[in-house]
Image (cartoon, rainbow, N blue to C red):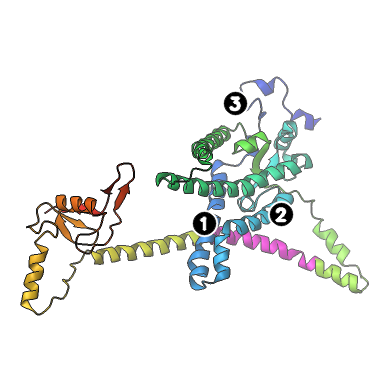
Amino acid sequence: MSFYSNLPSAGQSNQGSPTSGRNGVGLEPLYPTIFEIVSSQEIDSLLPTSIRYLLTNHLVANFPNRYTLQLNNYFHEWFQAVKGFVEWYHLKTYNSTFIDRFYGLQLFNSADRNLALTQCLNPQNRNAWPQALQLTQMQKKVVFLERIIFPYIRTKLDEIFERLSVSNIFGSNETEEKWIKRVFLKIYPFIKKTLALSNLFVKLLFLTKRTGSVSSLQYLCNIEYTTMKSMSPALPNFKETKETDSRLRKTNISSIAAVLQSKLSIIPRILAFMGSQFFPTFIFMLRVYQWWTTQDMTAKLQKRLNDLDKDIPRPPVSSDGDERKDQKDVTEVCPVCEKAIQNPCVLETGYVACYPCAVSYLVDHGGHCPVTDKKLLGCTFNEELNEWEVVTGIRKLLI
């Protein structure tokens, strides 16, 4: 009777509780804080970038060969494959992902609200997690899609969107399937914003303790967060184990294997404990190292830029005085009109001329330099006007 007395009555479940309705009453103690979940998601997003940084700046930079380049080029594919194997193992074993487990987070099936409420209200069952609250196979597949498949698809779609945006800016002449590209460029940002807003709305519901989900997909599939609970059966008593082990046993291969197995069974737990302590420290030190190397690179670039600002020495001149005089006269005369330079401008080839003279010369001579006769990259031919135009081949000088 004490068990049923802890359950809320029908009248109590609808009286002024902010968590009434879909979330029921009194499930707040099951939910972790938003800071734990955000920290876990942040580490999960930083892990691939940190590994990619180590791979690019150390392995590929120090050992550039065919295999390391292929490893770097197909990073997203093999990393998501390895991560998917690890995540699926943790989902099957712990109802949690790899990163969430280190933060003491776990996912549970919130379809049966009464059982979840019973689990929350009964102090004797706090450490035991019933089978009905564990994730179903379909929910595990949903979490796997959300953590592995969807991020990979989003990464590839972002690359396609960036590539199409650049080609659209530079006016690519490709006409085939052009309408599909335009539709994709318009719809894809809208879909991303819609999903982001829906996830933000669910996070706001989490802050108000109306749900334990942090994404719209988890909310629709009744997947919520809680603190880590043990799902394995309780270990036998130490005294009983000692009494059982004190009996004389027959020595054979099977008994020796059983003893070795019992002794070695503690190794996975030791490794799991060491990993839980080492992994967050490793991520933190990796981020500090990445920040340190980035700061060092920034300082080197700034030093090089400061060196560029120094006075550039003049080029060596000939010892012949007449040659210096001719060179001086040439620099003061426009190569087009052969008069003193007025309204000066500099060409791509480095020569100075009058701005009106240079523009008219380039238009009339197909964008070729009046001194070197080289084609300037900043001069293009306008097919509509059937004439040459100066786009970026000239820069005016302010004296």
Quarter holding the N terminus is: top right
Crowd tier of the residue under label 2, counting other residues whose Cα lies within 10 Å: few below 14, some 14–19, many 20 or above: some
The answer to which quarter of the image holds residue 340 is bottom left
Q: Where is 64 relative to 189, above or below?
A: below
The answer to which of 387 and 317 lies nearer the viewer is 387
> What percent of the width, then of the height, locates residue 64?
51, 71
For badge 2, the amino acid type reads Tyr
**Is tag 3's residue or tag 1's residue first in the polypeptide sequence?**
3
Q: What are the residue bounds of the magenta stretch?
A: 262-285
The answer to which of 328 and 192 lies nearer the viewer is 328
The residue under label 2 is: 89
Residue drawn at x 85%, y 67% is 258
For badge 1, the amino acid type reads Thr
Residue drawn at x 52%, y 56% is 49
The answer to which of 296 and 336 lies nearer the viewer is 336
Name the side, left or right, on which 264 lies relative to 275: right
The residue under label 3 is: 18
Helix, strand, or loop for circle 3? loop
Q: CA distance from mark 1 to mark 2?
A: 23 Å
Q: Residue 344: which disc?
A: none
